[in-house]
Structures are given as structure tokens and as C-alpha cells.
Amino acid sequence: MSSIYAGVGDDDTVVGEAVALDLPAATFGARLVSGMIDYFLLMAILIAGLFLTMSVVSDEALASVGVRLTMIAAWLVFPVTLETLTRGKSVGKFAMGLRTVRDDAGPISFGHALVRGILGIAEIGVLFGVPAVLCALTNNKGKRIGDLVAGTYVVRDRARLTVHPPVQCPPHLIEWARSADIAPLPDGLSVSLRQLTGRRSQLSQAAWQSLVNDLSARTAQYVAPPPPAGTPAEDFLAAVSAMRRERDTARLANEAQLRERIKTRLQRS
């Protein structure tokens, strides 16, 4: 069951409580063109580097070392550095309006870029992209092997975003929710709750109800006292999500007021 709701939905980026942004995965064609641009660019850098190395270094042993260093720089250092600094973009992705993100739709780190880069050498540099293409054709996000291992995928960075309205607390649970103690939820569970509303249209009624019941049981461990007897699982989750959003909003407002008071006192002093 966890595979249904673990992490972010197929096309979603989460910002804030219960607000999802539709961020579709890149099409296979766009990724293919992007990959070809990057491949020919890296080949050009490699050839230029090898030519420069052979022109400058006359010693055979040093030339051998220089060739290896040039290959590492062209196929690993350059793409990994570029993706890290641009938070998921390569030259090909810039051209095609794409970006690499984590599976939870957040920006990638150096570690993600390094894993993708190392496996990219084997997938693309050694095997001419055949494993990457076959892998991308067999999963719904068009991931190559490097993406599967790194926990990343490529999105259409220029896609139009759709904001879903936040879930509201059921009226009959407002009094209970405002007095309930809701502990911080684990990241995975929190993301699952945020994505719950947007998943309904993607699942059958049986799968939806199973998902709701499972999330309700997991969430109940962090809420006290429990909701009134007979409360539907879906209403319980809606109340928890709405109350967490309400409390977070109040906390941020209080922090902003505190900063403003401190700023005012400093200015007066």
C-alpha cells in the first residue's frame, strides 16, 4: 500500500500544507533531445581536452594520466558541477526547459548529481545511451538507471502550475481539532497527507478507501485525544491537515510579529 502514496504524487510538487503544484514529468522525446545535446557537448569538450593534452604533454606517462583526467573532467566533473550549481539543469535541459528534481520534487544536491553522473558514464558514455533509453521506456516518469538509483526524475520546468485549494476542517470536528494535541508527523506521512486530496481522482474507490484507512491509522498515533467515535477516516485526516495548516500559519504570524517588535525596539534604542 505504501507505494501508492509514498513521497510526492506522479506530477506533484508540494508547497505548504495541503497545497500541491502540478509539475509533470518530462516527456521521453524532450529527455531524448536534451540527452543528445548534452552527449555531443560532452564529446566536444572531451575531444578538445584530449587535443589540448596531447599538444601540451610530450611525456607518454604524463600523457596517459592527462587523458584519464580529461575524460573524468569531461564526463563527470563538468556535468556534476553544472547540475549542482544550477539545481538540476544541464545545457540540454536549459535548451529544452527541463530540470532534474528529487523524487519528493525538491532540488537535487551534489550527492544526487554525483550518482547520476557516475552511472551516466556507464549508461551514456560507454553504452551509448541504450540502457538509459530502455529504462526510461519502462517507467512512468521516464527515469534512466541513474535516476532510479539517485532517487530523482526530470520535470518540465516551464510547465504551467496548478494550485489545488487547501483541505478544510469538517464543521463537526472543528471544536475537537482545535483542542487536540497533534504531534509533528514523520516526513513521509506528512507528504502523504498533503497529497491525499489530489490522489482521489487517480484511484478506484476501493483503493482510495484503503489508502485513507491506512493513513488514518498511522496518523492516529500522533493525535490525542482521538476524534469522536464514529468519525469517518477521511474527515479525521481532513481535520488534522487543516489544523496543522492553521497552527503553522498562526506560528509564522507570531514569529513575524515578534521580529517586528524586536526591530522596532532596536530602532528606538
Image: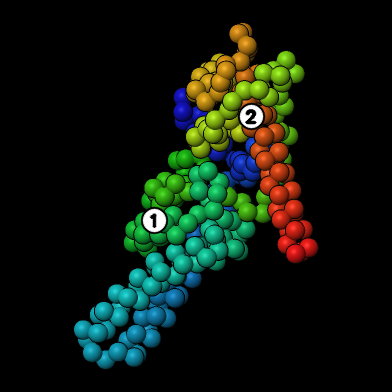
Could you tell me the amino acid type at mark 2?
Ser
Q: Is residue 236 placed above or below 136 in the rendered structure?
A: above
Place of residue 148 in the rendered image (x, y in percent of width and height, measured from the top left): 42, 46
Place of residue 183 in the rendered image (x, y in percent of width and height, measured from the top left): 54, 30
Mark 2 neighbour density, 10 Å: few (under 14) some (14–19) many (20 or more)? many
Q: Is residue 14 placed above or below 238 in the rendered structure?
A: below
In the image, what residue occupies the spot 59% across and 63% down?
Answer: 94
Could you tell me the amino acid type at mark 1?
Val
Place of residue 95 in the rendered image (x, y in percent of width and height, measured from the top left): 60, 64
Place of residue 19 in the rendered image (x, y in percent of width and height, measured from the top left): 67, 38
Residue 198, quarter of picture:
top right
Q: Is residue 45 placed above or below 190 in the rendered structure?
A: below
Q: Is residue 108 visible?
A: yes
Q: Is residue 237 placed above or below 138 in the rendered structure?
A: above
Q: Is residue 33 visible?
A: no
Disc 2 target residue: 241
Q: Disc 1 and disc 2: Cα gap in Å?
A: 35 Å
Of residues 56 and 192, the one nearer the viewer is: 192
In the image, what residue occupies the spot 53% across and 21% down?
Answer: 220
Camera-near label (1 vs 2) is 2
Residue at the extreme front of the image, as rendered: 269
Question: Counting residues from the N terminus, which is met first, the one under dot 1 or under dot 2?
Answer: 1
Q: Which mark is residue 115?
A: 1
Of residues 4 and 31, the one nearer the viewer is: 4
In the image, what residue occupies the spot 72% across and 44% down?
Answer: 253
